[in-house]
Amino acid sequence: MKSGVLRDLAVGAVLVALLLVLPILFPKPALRDFLIYVMAYGLLAMSLNLLVGLTGLVSFGHAAFFASGAYMFGLLMQSGTVGIPVAMLATVGGTAVLALVIGAICVRLKEIYFSFITLAFQMFIHSIILTWVSLTGGDQGLRGGIPRPPFLGIDLNDAMTLYVFCVVVFILCIAIMRQVWRSPFGFTLRMIRDNPTRANFLGADVVRVKLGIFVLAGSMASVGGVLLALFVSGAYPEFGFWTTSGEAIFMIMLGGSQLFIGPVIGAVLLRLLDHFVTIYTDHHGLVLGAVILVIVLGLRQGVADYIVDWLERRRETRAAAASVASEKGAA
Amino acid sequence: MLSVQNLSKSFGGVQATRDVSIDFPDGSLTAIIGPNGAGKTTFFNLISGAIRPDAGKVVFAGQDIVGRSSLEVVRLGMARAFQVAALFPSLTVKDAVTAAVTSHQRKSWTLLQRFPLEGTQHRTDEILELLGLSSKANTLSRNLSHGDQKLLDIGLALAMDPKVLLLDEPTAGMGPDERWRMIGKVQHLWEVKKMTVLFIEHDMDIVFKIAQAIHVLKYGAVLAQGTADEIRRNQDVIDAYLGTDHHLAHAAGQE
């Protein structure tokens, strides 16, 4: 049990080191920008996977909390009354309350009905953002920029500082989600994913547990929204449009839902595809669709899941071959 | 411990349970038998809180539990295994039992520690040992043989440390030898754990061999109840249920 924690810490440390070394090795701003995008959307996809991959709740409306993160944070900062840390905490708290209200209604429904009602709430929030022009700026987005006053001697107006800040927040959130993934609560979620009726007959309060993870996933998504708002210095209605939720689902499908880090791999792949395909053609949606079709029909699972399964199978065949060989040797 | 009084339930025009009253003494091993469609599984659903009865009482641990949710009933100490093994296909045998034990210890919400919790290890090993599943601890539930899946299903129920255990056809879908092995394990469990066990069974040889008391249901009502010998000789039962079974009719004639 302890060794699991140590291994996770080691992997986390390697990841931090990698993320910090990359922009030093390749000092072009484009790489930093790319990585910040990946981290922001990676948090969205990772948090969605707590619902999809871990609990079996396919939410189509997860970007609502991503947008709520960006807007709440942007508005708080524009009000000029609080610093960045307080604004972030208030945003996460506020989104948690929002997720609690929406989740309390959604998690009672099952399967496709759950998916559709989450989509409905997302469209509802998107409409509010579009129509409440005096507060949100409507379809123009939150204008006027988001101020980044220095705190604790940290000035996020410096591009590299902002990048490091994003890395730290990203890794912190990943660590929290990893803990959820490996905790007894995470296994309660797996029970519910596999067989909710049985989980209920084993003393798990299915509705409450689902609500718990819904709130947690929503809060984590809001952090992704905060990072994106900080980076682009604004918030836009597209953050909360259904296509953003769709992208998060694509990331999970591309990367894989059963390996913890799969959605981040998906986020990297999707952003890379986006980046390179748009250079060559306007029809990037077509290319993206084709790639997803190939993965869905060809691998029938995310890339990371496929690789894990493939390694597993190879190890098993080798073990079988080894045991046959040793039997022959004995004979 | 468990007592059912005047229990009734209808689904539309079908009376699935009609005025059933049965006492299950503490620590008894009781069989519920009856032809297909007699309302045996419905009876289990009614007492375990899965379905609410139209009328009647289910007295368990000194209180009427009609209207309680299945969750509350489980927490009071009544666990069940299912006719078609209800498992967690993607979890290993050990993880599934550990998760169930964790849930029983009311620690399903624990976030700050890692799975498995130290306090669950012993209990999990004990359950796997008891059912002979220790060697398959790391097998995924979905890859188990049919018989082992049924055993794991019972193992999950045992994790609730039940006072009353409901087994819905523990031997369903098994060959003759496997049936006897399975029921041997059930009997062993009952002896070791001193639980009150109710089981639904179709194999009359098994029922007559191990059950202390037998209750025969037909069209949702209690047709007869008694010991194996009493049921064997009961003319109603022979007519309604066993009459077609020459082997048993013959066996009854030999008594």
Image: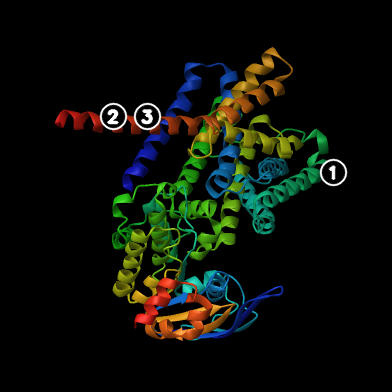
Q: Are marks 1 and 3 on the same chain?
A: yes
Most extreme residue toward the top is A280
Q: Nearer the viewer, mark 1 or mark 3?
A: 3
Query: What is the distance, in whole Å, between disc 2 and disc 3 at their CAs?
Result: 10 Å
Q: CA distance from mark 1 to mark 3?
A: 56 Å
Q: Label for residue A103?
A: none
Residue closest to the far left? A330
- Please state which amino acid type lies under the numbered disc 3: Arg
Q: Which mark is residue A314?
A: 3
The image quadrant of residue B210 is bottom left
Please, is residue B52 above or below residue B57 in the view?
above
Where residue A85 appears, as percent x and y from the top left, is 58, 44
Of the pair A213 and B184, the residue shown nearer to us? B184
Task: Read off the residue under disc 1.
Answer: A131
Q: Amino acid at mark 2?
A: Ala
Nearer the observer, disc 2 or disc 1? 2
Q: Is residue A112 left or right of residue B26?
A: right
Q: Position of residue A175 (x, y in %)?
A: 47, 42
**If you read the primary sequence from the N terminus, does the residue marked by circle 1 or circle 3 appear first?**
1
